[in-house]
Amino acid sequence: MFQVAAILDGKRMVLGTCYYPEHWPELMWKDDLRRMLDTGIEVIRIAEFAWNLTEPEEGVFTYDFFDRFLDLCDETGMKVIFGTPTATPPAWLTEKYPEVLNVDIDGKTYRHGARRHYNYNAPVYRALTERIVTKLAAHYASRKCIIGWQIDNELNCETAEFHSEADSAAFRLFLRDKYHTLDALNKAWGTVFWNQTYTSWEQLHVPRKTVSYSTNPHEVLDYIRFVSFSARSFCKLQCDIIRKYLKPGDFITTNGMFGHLDNHQMTKESLDFYTYDSYPNFAYCLDMYKDADALKDRRWSRNLMEVRSICPIFGIMEQQSGANGWNTRMEAPTPRPGQLTLWTLQSVAHGADFISYFRWRTATMGTEIYWHGILDYSGRENRRIAEVRDVHEKMKKLAPVAGKKYQAKVALLKDYDNEWDAELDRWHNRVSWQSESSLFAAAQHSHTPLDVVYLDHATAEQLSAYSLLFAPHLSLMTPERAAQLTAYVENGGTLVLGCRTAYKDVTGQCVMDKLPGLLQDLTGADVPEYSFIAPDAGRVTVQWGEDAFEASVFTDLVEPLEGSVREAVYTSDYYAGSGALVSRKVGKGTVYYYGSAFNEDSARLFLRKLGTANPCGDALVLPETCELAVRGDQEKRYAFVLNYLKTPAQITVRRPMKDLLSGETLSGECTLPGYGAVVLEI
């Protein structure tokens, strides 16, 4: 962290919105700013798609447009986050320098006319980026109204794959720096398979179209690492420039959370804090999420968990305020009365102290004409702006929560290498998706606050804060990661591992050790056989003491070595009688190796048997349709109870507690209205 931002000062909650003065007649600006302030909005984000307004022709710079607008911001007292405009290079640039355009794996160029059609590695684009960012920061950073800067917009959104010639050239440099010699690269990539051996660096390219869509998985894993490196480098290029011009107290951030990007490392390298773009209404998109999902918009809490792992106290740069929709896709309905407030409180419950709604006015032209903001096309008073005013009053009442961190004693362990490997490996992906979604659902329905922790960015102190860690399928394992896990258990932690653990090295190659590879000493487990559950196997069941449940997706037949205990066995198909769960005491703690993927039933059973489920059960009795989230410190804790249904929910408050939102003291049976919430001081 570089700066403590005014909008994340730990003293209050702050509301903002996204505003595009270039979309509206100048005579509307002042009235819009005053109206925002009257609504409770005190920060706006601007300029992230407006390169032409400063550089209408190459090397020709004009500052009049934003000077006039920022003069009004100074006059009215509106604070501004200024976005660098590199997500949408101007037409003069892409016409003169077509090498800056991104290319898909088939070699087809992404043309001008949308956004994020550039690549990070074209030298001319980096040079022009450096120049425009320098000009903007040098001219505007000293303005009184500007309090911070946003880098680009949603890095790696639209696509997280880059296949231009500039990317291949940069990939070669990345690989030279990593491997130094072609012999080392060929060994890491296993190029002896299918005669892929490289004898010159010039033979190396970013992945290209191959027959039957087959790939070298070790090459692609390095390619994803390269994409992350490229995006981080592009972000840092801009941050390093802006920091030369920052006023004391001003900040740098960026927004979104997209694939093929180590957001943890990017934040450490370049940002003061991280912001996310939260659109729970995607759960109702007619063309995106057609499969039934009982959690619906509540599933956005899983995304917020990820954000919180990057930055415990964070901002929302784009919070849902209206219906979704481009003219081409993403049709979703207008939030029902109360949902705008609910989704705002969902973000706050998970650690957001700054909420900026997307957007103030709904665009009347362009691709996003159906992506509604607080105001509709006419700008007339409506239900949503009234709800934002009410949210502002609620935010004032939630000031005691500001700066307090989300509290959980259970965490899901991940790392970027395994995330990326699961993306390109169907075997890994199938078990990983099953377990992560099930653990999240089990925690939600059992009211067990859950964190995400990235092992590749975690300290021993951070791990020790959790009594229980689930590491479902860390298939890629390194000696360093194994040492981290061992130290956690030895110091008193409980670690639960799932099938397909530690069978690959850091290159993605399968190890020849007895499984679970580098973790066999820690687990005291042996996996002599394994298989996907066959389609004709029916239900594969497991018996753990008095509890029976179903295995999912995969089965490791796992047997205890000396000093370990067989806790559970399979009870059906040819697995019957074989070990399904092994435990071992290590130092002050315990490690469990479970030979399958988690479904919600098995995840809930682990939470219950290991004594971590529903930690606030002595204070609150909640239906499964409500989410529980807790923010607090050593002195005070605040329980957010969120009802995601349009119908009322009955909750029981087992001892008198003050609700920050209503100011009332609640006790006994209480009714939470549809889309309602309470924030209880516990």
Image: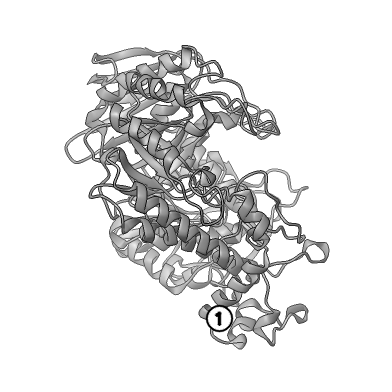
Residue shown at 25% from the left, 22% from the top: 397
Residue shown at 31% from the left, 65% from the top: 587
Indicate whether 467 appears above or below 522.
Answer: above
Residue shown at 57% from the left, 24% from the top: 323
The spot of residue 311 in percent (x, y) is 36, 48
For label 1, the SS is helix
The answer to whether residue 191 is left or right of residue 666 is right
Q: Is residue 336 visible?
A: yes
Within 10 angstroms of label 1, few (less than 14), some, or many (20 or more) residues? some
Q: Amino acid at mark 1?
A: Arg
Which quarter of the figure has residue 100? bottom right
Residue shown at 43% from the left, 69% from the top: 482
All told, the count of numbered labels is 1
The answer to whether residue 440 is left or right of residue 36 is right
Q: Nearer the viewer, residue 177 or 372?
A: 372
Q: Is residue 613 visible?
A: no
The spot of residue 445 in percent (x, y) is 47, 32
Q: Nearer the viewer, residue 99 or 305?
A: 99
Indicate whether 604 appears above or below 594.
Answer: above
Q: Nearer the viewer, residue 222 or 500?
A: 222
Which quarter of the figure has residue 43? top left
Label 1: which residue? 176
The answer to whether residue 129 is left or right of residue 622 is right
